[in-house]
Structures are given as structure tokens and as C-alpha cells.
Amino acid sequence: MQAAERNYEIYDKELLAIVEALAKWRQYLLDAAEPFEVWTDHENLKYFREPHKLNGRQARWYLKLQDYDFMLKHIPGKTNTKADILSRKDQVNTKEDNKDVQLLKDEMWTRNTTARITMLGQKVVPEEGDIIKKIRKNNTREKEVIQALEKNDGLAWEEDEVAYMDGRVYVPNNKELREEILKEHHDPAYVGHPEQHRMQELIKRTYWWPGLKEDVKKYVQGCVKCQQNKVQHQKKAGELHPLEIPEGPWQDISIDMISPLPRSNEMDAILVIVDCFTKMIRLKATTTNLSSEGVAKIYRDEIWKILLRWVPRGCCMDKGKGHDVNDRLR
């Protein structure tokens, strides 16, 4: 048992033993043809025979137990000597449990890589941090920032080798530095992988650079954890309906058009007619503005008169003309 599990109440420990045993033999017990029995000498399980408000752990166990068809059978401990000996073979030392445990860890209180911000009027005064030090070392300024500083209108200024734009710290055009800020405002557990708008709002409380919105969008779209746990708000796609397998040649056909092509003899497309049974193919030069009536005429002249004398049962076409072509053929 893990250290946390040894702190469970006795009835939770007994139920945990049953849950772990069922999980161990799951491949044999799940969907068993006959109900099976679980023998136990613990009367403490009677606690769960009465209605109770389950906590989160007990609720998870309850859902796991619903997968099995079993009966609990109580036997006295003196008649269950073999199992009792096995359960008491190794005495667990619990004296060291819960010792030197720091309940509120340091990382819950401080953020080491990001400078804190104190608002003084419209100025942002950052406390010394790794990112601020890196910004000071990088003295490059983009054209937009230089023009804003030259205006001297109070919306942009420079102080202690750090440029400020509209009360926010300007981050120079340094890929590694900007990626560090993006990572700090998205990946940590206390931030919680926010979506694009929320992440942008968090960054703009302190930092700014041209193209921030686009950088945030790319970072969120490239986050593996976000994509794996993304909630789908779109309507579920319908079921696929595969085409029936034809019983003979030219009973079902598919028609497609390769276009546009360089014009040759007033033709700029190729009509492709394929038999779904034999995969025989017929090609015909045509134009991109070919109508359903024109397709029917080509089928009549190139296939019906030469190869066979019947109309196909079905026609598959991806340009929205399939039903119309079927009617024309008939």
C-alpha cells in the first residue's frame, strides 16, 4: 500500500483490497458467464450496506464495481487462516508516514522566472527577474517601438534600459526570450493551459511586442496537451455509408473530371469513367463546363454503343451531378 492509502479508514482499506483484486483478475472476471463470489472475513464492509454520501474516491470504486457480477460472502476469520496468514506476512511500518511533509510547497507561493509587477500610476515597475535581465541585455528595438519612443507622448518611454509601451514591458525581437514568456504563461500547472484569448490577456498584463496575438495563437495550436484534451464543440460527423459492391461489370460506375488543363483543340478537361467492378477506365477529352446531359451523351457514345447495351444501376460523382446524370442515363 502507498503511504496515502495507509491513512484510509478501515472500511475503505477493506474495499480497496476488493477493488485491487478485481483489477488484478479483470481478464478472467469481466463478462464472466456465471456470477462469482468474493470471500472476506471483514465485517467492516457492512458500513457500505447502508446508504452514505460517497466521497470522490468511493464514487470511483463504485463505478469500477459495476463492471462485475459478483456476490460477497462473509466467512469467520478463524476459518480463513490461509488468507489471514498471507495478509499478515509482512508488517508495514507506519511510523514514518506523513513525516516531514510540506503541505504548501514553495512553488505555490512564488514564480521564480517571471518578474512581479507593481502599478504606480500608469508606469509598470518590474521587480528584478531573469526575464527583465535578459531584456536589458538585448537593446534591439523594432521600427514600431522606435517611432513610438520618438513621439514622446507619454505612451512609450524607456527607463533602466527597458522600453515600455502603453504601460507594458516591451520584449525585444528575440525568439528564445519570447518563447520563454509564452511558456511561462501557458505550461505551468498553476496557469492551467489557458486558451488563446485568456493567455493573451495574461501576457498583456505585463509584456507586449508586435505580433503578440499571432504568436499566442501558434503556441496554443502547437501545444500537444491542449490538442489532446481539447473539447470538441462541433456537431459529430455522420456515419459513413460505403458503396455497395457490384455483382457484374458496368453495373456501377464512377465519374470524375480532371480540370482545368492547358487548352488543346478547344478541350481543357478529361472526363474519367471507371467501372467499379472491373476497374476498367475510359477517358474522354472535354471542357470544364460539361453539363450532366453532356456526360450522358459521352457515356452513350463511348461505352453504351461499344461495350454493352444497358444502363448502369448507379453513378457516383463528386460534383453534385450524380443524381442528375443517373436520370439522364435512364
Image (cartoon, rainbow, N blue to C red):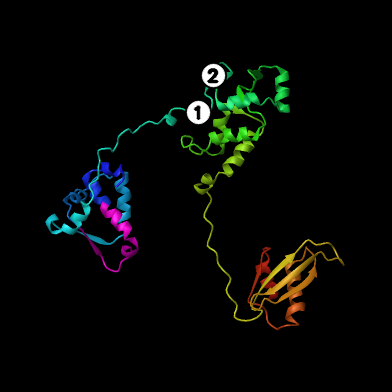
| Residue at x 73%, y 80% (from the top left corner) | 304
- Tell me if 46 is positioned left or right of 160 in this view: left
Q: How many marks?
A: 2
Instruction: Identify whether 255 is placed above or below 125.
Output: below
Q: Nearer the viewer, mark 1 or mark 2?
A: 1
Judge by depth and name the residue closer to the eye, 270 or 153.
153
Q: Are marks 1 and 2 in contact (CB under 8 Å)?
A: no
Magenta range: 17-39
Please tell me the numbered disc located at residue 112.
1
Please tell me the numbered disc located at residue 119.
2
- Quarter assignment of residue 302: bottom right
Q: Is residue 35 magenta?
A: yes
- Quarter assignment of residue 148: top right
- Tell me if 257 is positioned left or right of 168 in this view: right
Instruction: Give amino acid for label 2.
Output: Met
| Residue at x 33%, y 49% (from the top left corner) | 60
Q: CA distance from mark 1 to mark 2?
A: 19 Å
Judge by depth and name the residue closer to the eye, 10 or 198.
10
Q: Percent from the top left, x then y, of residue 215? A: 63, 37
**Looking at the image, which residue sits at the far front?**
90
Q: Percent from the top left, x then y, of residue 48? A: 22, 49
- Quarter assignment of residue 216: top right
Instruction: Identify whether 315 is placed above or below 170.
Output: below
Instruction: Give amino acid for label 1.
Output: Asn
Q: Is residue 10 magenta?
A: no
Q: Percent from the top left, x then y, of residue 236? A: 52, 55
- Residue 205 visible in this rendered orientation of the protein: no
Q: Which SS class for mark 1?
A: loop
